[in-house]
Structures are given as C-alpha cells and as structure tokens.
Image (cartoon, rainbow, N blue to C red):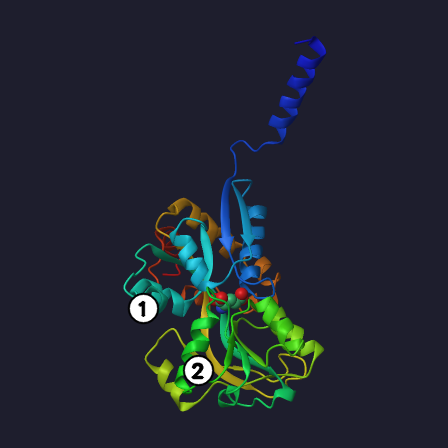
C-alpha cells in the first residue's frame, strides 16, 4: 500500500468514526395505513419525535401499510416493531374472533391509544345515497383486505340487512385510491374508519359535492351496546367543506400495538419519548390536537406491554 493511499484510508476511517454515534442506532419500524389517512401520520410523526429526542439511540422509520389487520399480523411475524391498529381489531386478535377466529394472538401487546376514529360513509350528493339502505345497487368501496374499515363495513352491511355479494358491487381499494375513485365517479360511496380531519375525506370534500351519511340505526346502537370498544360519536357540521350537517356514527380508538418479542427498553423509550414531547406531537397533525396523557391509556383492549406499564406507573398515570 503506498503511503498516500494509507493516509487517505486512515483519514476516511477517522471521518467515518467521528460522524458515528458512540453505539449504532437501533432500528424501529412502525406500520401505519394509507398515505392519506392518519395512521401513516402516527407512524411518521412519532418516529420524527423518536429520532429527534432519543439522542441517536434509535433510527425510527414510519411507513405506509395496509391498516389494522395487516399491522397486527405483521407485528406478530416480527416484520414490524410497532403498528397502528383499531381497538376493535385488537380485541378480536387477543380473543381469537373475526379475522383471528380460533387463533388468538397471545403475543399482541398495547402500547398507547391515540385519536378516536369514526366509521365514515362518504358519497357524492348526486348519488342520492342518504342512508346505508340506499347503498343497494351501488358500487361501494368496503376497504382493502388488511384494513380495519373492511370489518366495520361488513358489520354495518349485515346489520342493515344488505348482502355484500348480491345487493351491492363491493370494491376493495386502498383508501388513497378510493377517495380518487369517488371523485372520478368510479365508486358511489366508500367506508373509511379514520380520525378527523383526514386528507382522505378532505380531498373529495374540497373538490366535489360530497356528503357524509349517518350510521346510527337502532340495529347499530344494539350492536355496539355490549362492546366497550365502540361508542357513538358525532362529526360536527363544518368539519369538512360543504358538509353542513352533523353526522352520527360509531367510533373506535386508534392505538399503537407491539408484541411480547419487542424489548421492554424499546417500548419504554418509545412511550416516554412520545409522552414527554406530546405538545410537539400535537402540533404535527390536526387529529392529534385533542390528545391528553390520561386518555391515551383508555381503549386498550390487548394486554399492556411491560415497557409501557413501567412508564405509566413512573408517571403516576396508573
Ligand atoms: N382505521 C384504518 C385501518 O385500520 C386506518 C385509518 C388511517 O389510516 O388513518 O385500516
């Protein structure tokens, strides 16, 4: 090796060393939802907080994903460290019902809850759809396989006595495509379970005469009455452009979930960093503005991860 080359190798090695943190950062991967929903913002913005405030200990990446059911299953398989998921899906996975019939996920763990999500039915005013019953004969996006809204849409259709195979033309688009498809008149309506406001609802509201349809029949009230993870909720008039009436429907909580395989240290650090920088997080998306530390322990239907519990006890929240 000639001297000049040796010197430059040494210099490069030193420069490299100087720019490395003392210990290599640990990777964290968090799965969200469609890019126009709020889950992706949860994944993206909590990672932003982690990367900014963990002193180089973590390299956190929030990515778009297919939604609740996908995230729960991906966390189980170790493909994600954390995922965002609806409280009703966490309950079903933990108890082995619905998509997890006969195969409960014993490893599923709750980390914290985030914003409430309303089960929305959006249409265009020109379709004449004013109630769920009017969906008969229409093309309706019920949500992509892997999404949380698909199960909600299937429950609603069943409760209203609509056969999704015979009575409607059911589509399974991801939400970013579904909002587009409503604008382009390729679907007449879509179901989406999401926090407010979300870009997926703003897009049609801002560009066409769109409408939100209430989902509040006696059948729905009866259905939610014995399920503690559902509540009735109202989207106030004016939340979205051109929608000047209140919309009543039911709601779940968005939660962050993980598995027993993820270390106590990582979960503790994640929860602590998010809670201690909550004011900053609240400024990063409008759906986060209502977050309050105490509420973020509510609606957790899978057992709490010990790393999260450690922080909540330390903080006097439980
Ligand atoms: N609730 C939806 C789901 O579970 C996702 C909503 C969002 O991306 O904000 O798939």
Residue 139, quarter of picture: bottom right
Q: Position of residue 220 (x, y in %)?
A: 41, 85
Q: Which structural element holds mark 1?
A: loop
Identify which residue, 43 or 294, lies in the foreground: 43
Q: Are marks 2 and 1 in contact (CB under 8 Å)?
A: no
Q: Residue at x 67, y 20 (%)?
A: 11
Residue shown at 56% from the left, 33% from the top: 21
- Specify the label residue 86 is tagged with: none
Up/down of 95 relative to 60, above or below: below
Name which of mark 2 and mark 1 comes first in the sequence.
Answer: 1
- The residues tagged by marks 2 and 1 sit, at their Cα atoms, a distance apart of 19 Å
Q: Is mark 1 within 8 Å of ligand 1?
A: no
Mark 1 packing: few (<14 Cα in 10 Å), some, or many (20+)? some
The residue lying at 54 percent from left, 79 percent from top is 140
Say which quadrant the N terminus sits in: top right
The quarter of the image holding the C terminus is: bottom left
Q: Which mark is residue 157?
A: 2
Measured as percent of width and height from the top left, residue 128 is found at 60, 91
* Side of 197 where 110 appears, left or right: left
Apparent side of residue 91 relative to residue 167 in the rendered image (left or right): left
Residue in front for this viewpoint, 250 or 293: 250
Visible residue check, residue 198 = no
Q: Residue at x 58, y 51 (%)?
A: 48
Q: Percent position (x, y) of residue 258?
A: 41, 54
Picture layout, residue 214 above or below residue 106: below
Q: Nearer the viewer, mark 2 or mark 1?
A: 2
Mark 2 Cα shell of 10 Å, populated few (<14), some (14-19), many (≥20): many
Residue 97: assigned label: 1
Secondary element under disc 2, as helix, strand or loop, is: helix
Q: Position of residue 25 (x, y in %)?
A: 52, 38
Residue lying at the far top in this picture: please name it: 2
Report whether residue 305 is seen: yes
């Amino acid at each position: 090796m000639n001297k000049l080359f040796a010197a430059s190798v040494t210099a490069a090695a030193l420069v490299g060393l100087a720019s490395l943190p003392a210990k290599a950062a640990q990777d964290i991967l968090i799965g969200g939802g469609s890019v126009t929903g709020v889950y992706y913002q949860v994944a993206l913005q909590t990672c932003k907080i982690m990367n900014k405030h963990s002193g180089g200990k973590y390299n956190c990446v929030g990515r778009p994903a297919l939604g609740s059911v996908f995230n729960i299953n991906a966390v189980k398989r170790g493909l994600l460290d954390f995922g965002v998921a609806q409280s009703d899906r966490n309950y079903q996975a933990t108890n082995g019902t619905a998509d997890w019939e006969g195969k409960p996920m014993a490893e599923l763990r709750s980390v914290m809850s985030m914003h409430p999500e309303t089960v929305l039915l959006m249409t265009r005013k020109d379709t004449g759809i004013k109630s769920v019953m009017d969906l008969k004969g229409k093309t309706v996006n019920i949500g992509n396989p892997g999404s949380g809204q698909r199960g909600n849409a299937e429950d609603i259709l069943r409760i209203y006595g609509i056969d999704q195979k015979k009575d409607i033309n059911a589509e399974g688009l991801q939400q970013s495509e579904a909002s587009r498809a409503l604008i382009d008149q390729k679907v007449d309506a879509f179901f989406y379970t999401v926090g407010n406001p979300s870009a997926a609802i703003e897009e049609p509201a801002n560009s066409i005469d769109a409408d939100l349809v209430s989902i509040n029949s006696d059948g729905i009230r009866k259905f939610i009455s014995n399920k503690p993870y559902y509540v009735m909720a109202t989207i106030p008039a004016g939340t979205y452009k051109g929608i000047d009436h209140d919309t009543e429907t039911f709601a779940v909580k968005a939660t962050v979930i993980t598995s027993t395989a993820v270390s106590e240290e990582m979960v503790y650090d994640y929860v602590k960093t998010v809670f201690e920088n909550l004011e900053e997080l609240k400024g990063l998306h409008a759906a986060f503005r209502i977050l309050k530390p105490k509420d973020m322990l509510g609606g957790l239907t899978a057992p709490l991860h010990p790393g999260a519990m450690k922080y909540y006890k330390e903080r006097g929240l439980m």
